[in-house]
Each structure stands twice: as structure tokens, then as C-alpha cells.
Amino acid sequence: MSNIAKAFDHGKAFIAFITCGDPDLETTRETVIRMVEAGADLIELGIPFSDPTAEGPVIMDADKRALDGGVTTDDIFAFTKELRKTVKVPMVYMTYANVVYHYGAEEFCSKAQDAGIDGLILPDVPFEEKADFEEVCQKHGMDLVSMIAPTSENRIAEIAKEAKGFLYVVSSLGVTGTRSAITTDLRPMIELIRENTDIPCAIGFGISNPEQCRQMASLADGAIVGSAIVKIVAKNGKDSAEPVAAFVKEMKDAIRDL
């Protein structure tokens, strides 16, 4: 069984994203530990990239702050390995194909495995081009997590059938970022996913408050929150761990009884 599945085996999963190195890795470490204590079931660690095409301004700015602070992918591998000694929930990296290409897919996945990472999300790699990455991920005991968007349409069933770890369901068109309302009707998409796979699915992009979190988790197997957390980090800097933990607890509490 995929290690990622553990995030979903005791009710609806709360998945928290954070950009590594914003404002520094020590703050990221403290914040991740506190998020897990507050109820996060899976952690997405963002490896900053200079041109993150799927991201809105909140995460783009976080990537820039981290890169300006000098954080490197090697730093993040070492940081994750150390973090893994404390954090027991599943962790995945989210980054872009260029970061992996630059490193060499084999070496990147080998180091990620050594660091205790369970999966990889590459939002700029289309379904048709995932084979190269998937093979090397599997070799190193990681799941390449697929994304399904409202625009996937006739490919939804195909993507679902081949999914590993969990399916990342994109709630709305466009880039990441908090939204005042999520208006896409995701029910037909979730039903089609369920017809084609037993892999859990979680909805992300735009979830920013407990009500939205509950609404999305009631449809799927979990909810993913990124920009809303990164905003708190942007506001609080090195003092982010406690306010982020309070936010995560609020979000997790909203889905506990579903």
C-alpha cells in the first residue's frame, strides 16, 4: 500500500502546503511540525522555482522570497531528511519539471527517497508526458501524484485509472490562490473518478476558510490548502508557526466529523 494512503485511513484528510525556505528553513521546520500537531494529515513541501506557472501571486512571492534567501534544492533535501526524524505523516514534494530535469530525474528521486519523501507533484507535466517521471518515482518508492482539472473532461477516467498515491482535484480554472467562493460543480468529476479508481482524491486550489474546507472535503476524501497558509507566513515571517497551526486546527476541526 502507498504510504500516502495513510493520510486518508482515519477520515477526511487535511493536506497542508508550505513553501520551503520562506522566510527560512528553520521557520519552515517549526511550522511543519506545528501543522502536524494541529491535525495536518499530509504535508506538501514546495520546492521553490523561479517560474512557477501554476501558482498565483501568493506562492510566486513565497518562491521569490525563498530563492532570494539563498535556499537550494540540496538544502531542501538535507532539511527534509532532518524533518523526517520528527514528522511521521506522509510528505510529498511539489515543484516543477525543470527543477527535476536540472538535477536529473534519477538523482532527484534518489535524494527525495533518501530524505523520506513519499510522492511528487509536478503541475506542469501533462498526463501524456508523465511516464518518464513515473517510472523513476516508482523505482524510488514514491508516487507521482496526478492532477485532474475541470478541463480534463474526457481524460478524467483515464487519469483516474492510472493514479498513484492520491488524486489532486483542481477546484477551478486558473492559478492557485484563495477564492471567496468555489463555484465549479465538482460532483460529476468526483463521481467519474470514483467509478474508475479506489485511490483517494483531495480537492485543492482556492480553499481559504473552514466552510470551504468542509464543503470540499464532504465531496472528496480530503482538502488541500496552500495559498491561505502561505499568506499567513508572508504576514508573520519567522513568527509563523503558531498562527499557521491555529489556522490548520480550525480547518481540520471543520472536517473531523464528516
Image: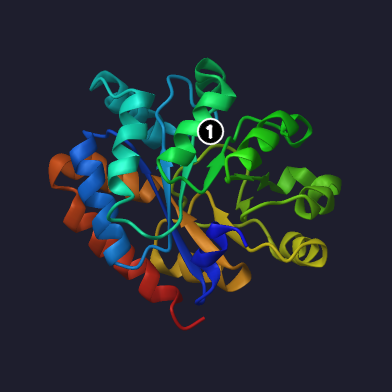
Where 217 falls versus 56 (above or below)? below
Residue at 52 percent across and 81 percent down: it is: 258
Please provide percent x and percent y for residue 210: 40, 67
User: Residue 185: x and y, percent?
Assistant: 69, 61
Give coordinates of residue 208: x percent, y percent: 41, 56
- Please count the marks in the image: 1
In which quarter of the view is residue 147 placed?
Answer: top right
Q: Nearer the viewer, residue 12 or 58?
A: 12
Q: Give the camera-side residue of 18 and 56.
A: 18
Q: Is residue 186 above or below residue 176?
A: below
Please state the horizontal and vertical placement of residue 55, each as a whole percent of the image: 49, 34
Where disc 1 sits, the SS reads helix
Q: Is residue 171 left or right of residue 46?
A: right
Q: Residue furthest right?
A: 154
The reply, left or right, for residue 184 in relation to residue 83 is: right
Instruction: Name the residue that disc number 1 marks.
Output: 109
Indicate the amino acid at tag 1.
Cys
Q: Residue furthest top?
A: 102
Image-based side of 122 in relation to 16, left or right: right
For the residue pair 120 and 228, the one nearer the viewer reads as: 120
x 21%, y 33%: residue: 24
Q: In this view of the protein, can residue 258 be seen by the observer?
A: yes
In this rendering, the answer to whether 64 lies above or below 13 is above
Q: Answer with left or right where residue 75 lies relative to residue 135.
A: left
Q: Quadrant of the N terminus?
A: bottom right
Q: Is residue 97 visible?
A: no
Name, please, the residue furthest toward the bottom. 257
| Residue at image point 54% right, 37% down | 175
Residue at 40%, 40% (x, y): give it. 115
The answer to which of 118 and 65 lies nearer the viewer is: 118
Q: Is residue 253 above or below residue 135?
A: below
